[in-house]
Amino acid sequence: MNHDSAIFVAGQDSLMGSALVRELQRQGYANLVGVLKDEPDLTDADEMEAFFRHSQPEYVIVAGGKTGGIEANQKYPADLIRDNLLVDCNVIHGAHCHGVRKLLYLASSCSYPKHCPQPMRVESLLTGPLEPTNEAYAVAKIAGIKMCQAYRSQHAANFITGIPANPFGPGDDFTPEDSHVIAALMLKIHEAKERGDSAVPIWGTGAPRREFISADDVASACIFIMQEYEGSQPINLGGGEDLSIIEAATVIKEVIGYQGEFTFDTSKPDGMPVKLMDSSELLAMGWKPSSTFRDAIQITYRWFLEHLAGTAASDGAGAATR
């Protein structure tokens, strides 16, 4: 992948898509096609066919598809599975038909079984039941993994899959219904500070553990594996450290400067009890994250204050822990 190669990031309005565009530009990749207003509708087969025919991207990174936290997954499972399956089919098949040299599909840590041995290894995929609260979304992401492997097997397509840890950062979705845990916590704690609330309610027990990672670090890992990884099996994209929800909330509280307490609504689901990625293969190849969790939280909160403070309103929903 050269600096003048035609590269298409599918899903540029997403957290990971916007981070990928930033990181590609930072590293000097100047020929990005389908950027922002020119991006086709990934769920429209005719639009995608016309886009591939006209733009002829050499490399594709698939970061698109609807996503959300526990609440969105419970309310809109049909939307989530349909949207992501359409993206899988249109982008992966289009890349094959138009001779894309290499494609990276970004799956999700939700693809792993609910009671997966920790840290999660790719060998554990499809070995047990999924977490029920996000099963529809997870099935669509597993389908994307299997599509890449099927096109590789039948057509010798150079399609690879990365499974990121839980990303967060500038450009995240801070809406109460669709946000993931870091954005949900940041919004709730910020608003509690602004209102002078004495406590912030959090969904579940606060005990589930997640591996959080800066979206910019995931983007860096994606570009690294586009250059260095050729395997047919998915590769985990993480830094190897996890935090409990309450530990993550405490760091966010300190960065925001909130002085109140946390309460826990244990009538709400926790989601998977633990999600820590085994990223030893990636780390052994020489990649490592560039930011600490606290540093990434500070960067994300600055972005939130500049772009969203005062415009996002919490409806009292707890932090989604997917």
Image (cartoon, rainbow, N blue to C red):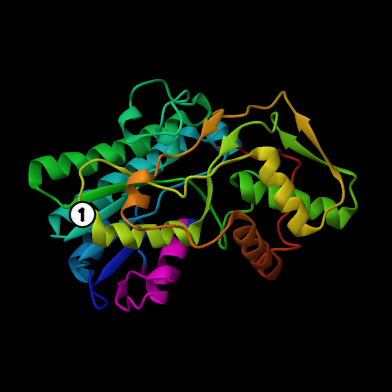
Image quadrant of residue 249? top right
Quadrant the N terminus occupies? bottom left
Depicted 312 relative to depicted 86: above or below: below
Q: Which residues are magenta?
A: 16-38
| Residue shown at the point (22%, 44%) measured from the top left | 148
Residue 239: x and y in percent read 47, 50
Return the residue nearer the eye: 236 or 317: 236
Residue 191: x and y in percent read 80, 53
What's the residue type where badge 1 is placed?
Answer: Gly
Residue 29 shown in magenta: yes
Residue 214: x and y in percent read 52, 57
Q: Secondary structure at mark 1?
A: helix
Residue 92 seen in the current view: yes
| Residue shown at the point (77%, 31%) measured from the top left | 264
Residue 14 seen in the current view: no
Residue 75: x and y in percent read 57, 33
Task: Answer left or right for 237 relative to 285.
Answer: right
Q: Which residue is mark 1?
A: 94
Return the residue nearer the eye: 242 or 80: 242
Task: Answer left or right for 197 relative to 109.
Answer: right
Q: List the single residue furthest toward the top.
A: 128
| Residue shown at the point (32%, 46%) measured from the top left | 281
Q: Which SS does the magenta portion mostly show?
A: helix
Residue 86 shown in magenta: no
Quadrant the C terminus occupies? top right
Depicted 4 relative to depicted 167: above or below: below
Q: How many marks?
A: 1
Return the residue nearer the eye: 113 or 179: 113
Depicted 67 relative to depicted 140: above or below: below
Task: Answer left or right for 57 relative to 219.
Answer: left
